[in-house]
Amino acid sequence: MGAQIVTITSGKGGVGKTTAVANLGIALAANGKKVVCVDGDIGLRNLDVVMGLENRIVYDIVDVIEGRCRLRQAMIRDRRLPGLFLIPAAQTRDKTAVSPSDMLRLGAELRSECDWILIDSPAGIERGFKNAITPADRVIVLTNPEVSAVRDADRVIGILEAEEKGSPSLIINRIDYDMVKNHDMLSAEDVLDLLAIDLIGIVPEDQTVLIAANRGTPIALDDKSRAGQAFRNIARRLTGEDVPFMDLDSQDGLWQRLSRLTGRK
Amino acid sequence: MKELPPLVQIKGLRDGLLVSLGDADWEKLQAMLIAQIDERQAFFQGARLALDVGSQILHVTEMVNLRDVLSERNVSLWAVVSDSPTTVKTAQLLGLATRVSKPRPEESLRPAADAVEDETALWLRRTLRSGTRIEFPGHVVVVGDVNPGAEIIAEGSVLVWGRLRGVVHAGAGGNREATVCALELSPTQLRIAGEIALPSEKKGERPEKVYLGNGRLVVEPWQPVNLKSNR
Ligand SMILES: Nc1ncnc2c1ncn2[C@@H]1O[C@H](COP(=O)(O)OP(=O)(O)OP(=O)(O)O)[C@@H](O)[C@H]1O
Ligand SMILES: [Mg+2]
């Protein structure tokens, strides 16, 4: 299988795209894959912080595109995982510094460097979004189980369908099972029922996510973290493995109902 | 030498300005339009703008960009009229209107449009997702869901073979005979002609039909057409 480019996007901001890219990158690299995470959020970069690589930045994506450095010079290698790299966004430029065709060229060049390319998209449907989805083989829409986030995800899915990007996959992030049980939060089923696209993962609300991000050691490496486990499972599903959805305590038979909704077995 | 029609034509509409763009490269047209606006700031300040782009094919990014550039100049883009189905679909996805009150010049040559043929319908075989706005001067049939945040404005009736959860306005031109039917009727808001129905709490579990009876919106099970009443 050739290299795959996966873009993670959302309609609403702050739902966990950057968290997902960092953790999926780690999980894939921990399985021996060579992975490059690309921060597509020009002007608001933060994937470097979440990955704990902020202080190692010399060149960024705009330097590569404008030819001030070679691709490999902008690929920062992770300290723990030898197969994991980051191409940071430029902090001081805006998104007009990069065009969709620049991203196509960059993507093509990266394919020969690694197995997986994960692109962190900015929120919204403007230029930065277009840049991030243009080179993608596969798009993942991430949402929280919250009415306004789901509404915006729905909108982005409509646009992806119209742009002929194929039907995206869905990650539902920050499910809090106690709140769902008390009917204070939409359930995964509610979200899936409305969005009606392929579900690739459900990530629970987990305090350790924030703590880990501040320390620059994402939870995908933490065996005890439930969110970390969820990201590791998504990474395996990306590689084509059929991983059952986590046993979400309270929710009897959730998986059967989800299977019905997604048409999977 | 014959003079070419100007690439940017501006007309007043009942509810704002209509700008018709000629046939040229999109980048160039957009630049010309912006130049016009910058030159006549006082005139355009706060304007509601409808844009007729002819057969120009516009995708989401281009239209979003245009809307942003206009709004920076305090001009709000509310409608995009086009002959290109792609452009119309883009405008629908962004929730922009796709028709304007005054008929376009070439349309006025066609037979009077008020006699909407009863057998004409817009057939949409997809789910209408949030942010989508569909306007049609006849009936609308959706084979798919109408999600919350999507909107249908039809001069005729609306039939949804799926779940209706968005906003629907049937008989938008005042036609009180219009009806709304859906397999699952739980709209955010439903209107027929001038009457508005508030959403009921219960989730529609069987096919239902809404019509205007004695000036009120009436909901009843949607069943095979009774040939005698033939409503
Ligand atoms: N599963 C989770 N449990 C708890 N907190 C989470 C979870 N996922 C993300 N967060 C927190 O949510 C916040 C936003 O996450 P993140 O920066 O990844 O979102 P984003 O979608 O990339 O935002 P933006 O649109 O601004 O780029 C962070 O503080 C992060 O730690
Ligand atoms: Mg982010």
Image: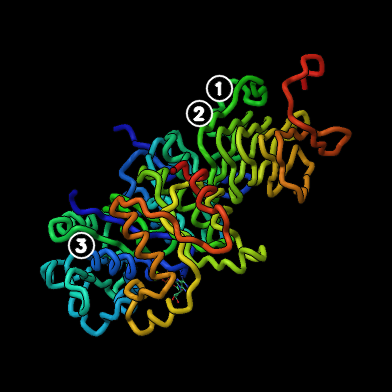
Q: Chain of mark 3?
A: A
Q: Please state which amino acid type lies under the numbered disc 2.
A: Glu
Tell me if residue A8 comes above or below residue B5 in the rendering.
Answer: below
Question: Residue at image x 79%, y 36%?
Answer: B219
Question: Residue at image x 69%, y 36%?
Answer: B170
Alpha carbon distance from label 2 to label 3:
60 Å
Which residue is the extreme one toward the right?
A: B214
Queried on whether the Cβ of the residue with tag 1 lies below 8 angstroms from ligand 1, the answer reads no
Seen from the viewer's position, the closer of residues B79 and A48 is A48
Q: Secondary structure at mark 1?
A: loop
Queried on whether the Cβ of the residue with tag 2 lies below 8 angstroms from ligand 1, the answer reads no
The residue that disc 3 covers is A33
Seen from the viewer's position, the closer of residues B51 and A32 is A32
In the rendered image, which quarter contains the C terminus of chain A?
top left
Please provide percent x and percent y for residue B81: 49, 40
Q: Please state which amino acid type lies under the numbered disc 3.
A: Lys
On screen, residue A17 versus residue B136, left or right, reads: left
**Crowd class of label 2 (few under 14; some 14 to 19; many from 20; radius 10 Å):** few
Q: Could you tell me if residue A31 is visible in this image?
A: yes
The residue that disc 1 covers is B110
